[in-house]
């Protein structure tokens, strides 16, 4: 620990859940936390307007009368790169914008991965969806996965088994990729991109070799050039084989495989120059071939891990993010929580192509659940009147209608609590009326 002076930490993309997590820090009296724009101003936007958001955030910091000691965030685009710009302007500890882009630009990331961990890098190629004949750019055999070089929540991500699938993906990309791609280019224009990736801007796609197996993710942080891993999560797929069902902690992947992923993670984070920040990396491990493959690098703390850390370890991963931001050693503990297992479930519907939300759980429904399961949390993602096909940032195969966060002393107890919670949270959808 360094100074006991109270530190002013600005939270980029602040919301009530941030507030609850931060208030649970064991040394919360050492900090004052301040909103630096709220989540509803920054994420899930129809138009991100990055430059306007930056100016608004600068005004908040400039008007603060005391010293700004750190900036933290747990959101992806556009929040994390905004944080890098603001921190650099004020000389605060934060990963550089270039290192963040080397992780989150999926093609650039693959190029960097191939240099140091080729054995864990799936085959890939860039695809310009606006080219006259995009299929000519694909160097992979069917099947493969295609997605934007910048996206999140599996938006515009497709499994491609044939030319018909490919053409469908290209059509969707042409219609929707610029929503994120144009704003991502704002950040790309602020760094010197190497010649090998310079032409692949935010409105490109990346086609990747189809890999599979057990999916898991180490979460860690780099501080003063030293990489640490403070948790390992399983990313459990739904029955459709394309969507996430839950993010579960701790991972059940074999210890040797976890150790290999840790060493691989250290190599790639050093390669991209990532420092003074949190990250998580998603992997596939194929038990049949023993192959370990990187899926993607997320250069930020994961909000999808906070509840699980809290329930199993007794504190959320905000503990790490806050202390790294001010240069302190994190006080993170292992296994000091109330439960042995915890998960964030993405409560989805798979069998409705479209519909209008006519009912969501009421306050009374949620209160009944909390009486039965005091430690279960629920975030409802939709509202009555919403049209499913118009929900933003959904994958191509399902709709997320809620997040249900549950914990248990065993995996079986955790799963039973999730299914019971789903029973107690009624939703209803009406068909879309013909025009």
Image: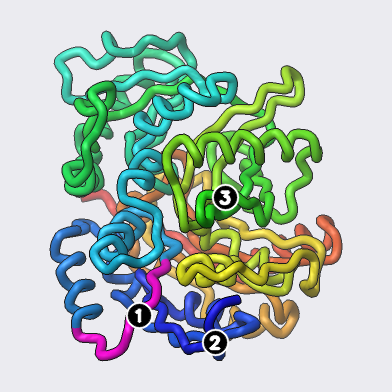
Coloured how? rainbow
Q: Foreground residue, 431 or 66? A: 66
| Secondary structure, magenta segment, majority class | loop
Gap between marks 1 and 3 measured at Cα: 29 Å
Q: Which residue was labeled with disc 3?
A: 226
Q: Position of residue 339 (x, y in %)?
A: 80, 69
Q: Which residue was labeled with disc 1?
A: 35
What is the number of the mark on residue 190? Answer: none
Give the magenta range: 63-72
Q: Is residue 164 above or below residue 364?
A: above
Gap between marks 1 and 2 measured at Cα: 22 Å
Q: Position of residue 164 (x, y in %)?
A: 35, 17
Residue at left offset 22%, top offset 33%: 201
The reply, left or right, for residue 426 in relation to residue 191 is: right
Q: Which residue was labeled with disc 2?
A: 4
Query: Are there few (<14), some (14-19), or many (20+) residues within 10 Å of tag 3?
Result: few
Q: Quadrant of residue 64?
A: bottom left
Q: Is residue 7 above or below residue 113?
A: below
Membership of 373 in magenta stretch: no
Residue at left offset 19%, top offset 57%: 47
**Circle 1: element type:** strand
Query: Are there few (<14), some (14-19), or many (20+) residues within 10 Å of tag 2?
Result: few
């Amino acid at each position: 620990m360094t100074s006991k002076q109270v530190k002013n930490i600005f939270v980029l993309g602040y919301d009530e859940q941030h507030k609850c997590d931060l208030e649970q820090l064991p040394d919360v009296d050492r900090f004052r936390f301040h909103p630096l724009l709220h989540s509803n101003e920054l994420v899930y936007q129809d138009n991100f307007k990055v430059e306007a958001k930056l100016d608004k955030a600068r005004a908040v910091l400039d008007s603060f009368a005391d010293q700004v000691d750190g900036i933290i965030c747990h959101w992806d685009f556009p929040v994390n790169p905004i944080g890098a710009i603001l921190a650099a302007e004020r000389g605060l500890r934060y990963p550089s914008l270039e290192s963040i882009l080397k992780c989150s630009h999926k093609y650039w990331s693959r190029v960097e991965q191939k240099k140091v961990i080729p054995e864990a890098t799936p085959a890939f190629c860039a695809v310009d969806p606006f080219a006259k004949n995009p299929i000519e750019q694909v160097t992979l055999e069917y099947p493969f996965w295609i997605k934007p070089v910048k996206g999140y929540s599996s938006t515009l991500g497709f499994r491609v088994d044939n030319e018909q699938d490919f053409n469908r993906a290209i059509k969707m990309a042409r219609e929707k990729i610029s929503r994120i791609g144009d704003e991502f280019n704002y950040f790309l224009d602020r760094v010197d991109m190497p010649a090998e990736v310079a032409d692949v801007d935010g409105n490109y796609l990346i086609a990747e070799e189809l890999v599979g197996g057990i999916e898991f993710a180490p979460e860690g942080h780099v501080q003063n050039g030293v990489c640490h891993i403070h948790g390992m999560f399983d990313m459990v797929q739904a029955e459709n084989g394309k969507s996430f069902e839950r993010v579960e902690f701790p991972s059940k992947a074999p210890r040797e495989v976890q150790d290999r992923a840790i060493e691989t993670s250290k190599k790639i984070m050093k390669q991209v120059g990532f420092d003074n920040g949190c990250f998580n990396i998603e992997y596939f491990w194929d038990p049949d071939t023993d192959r370990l493959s990187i899926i993607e690098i997320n250069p930020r703390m994961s909000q999808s891990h906070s509840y699980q850390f809290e329930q199993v370890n007794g504190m959320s991963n905000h503990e790490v993010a806050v202390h790294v931001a001010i240069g302190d050693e994190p006080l993170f503990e292992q296994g000091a929580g109330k439960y042995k297992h915890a998960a964030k479930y993405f409560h989805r519907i798979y069998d409705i192509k479209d519909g209008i939300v006519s009912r969501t759980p009421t306050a009374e429904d949620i209160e009944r659940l909390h009486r039965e399961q005091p430690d279960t949390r629920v975030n409802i993602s939709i509202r009555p009147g919403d049209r499913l096909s118009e929900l933003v940032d959904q994958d191509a195969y399902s709709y997320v209608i809620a997040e249900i966060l549950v914990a248990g002393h065993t995996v079986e107890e955790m799963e039973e609590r999730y299914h019971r919670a789903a029973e107690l949270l009624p939703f209803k959808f009406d068909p879309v009326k013909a025009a």
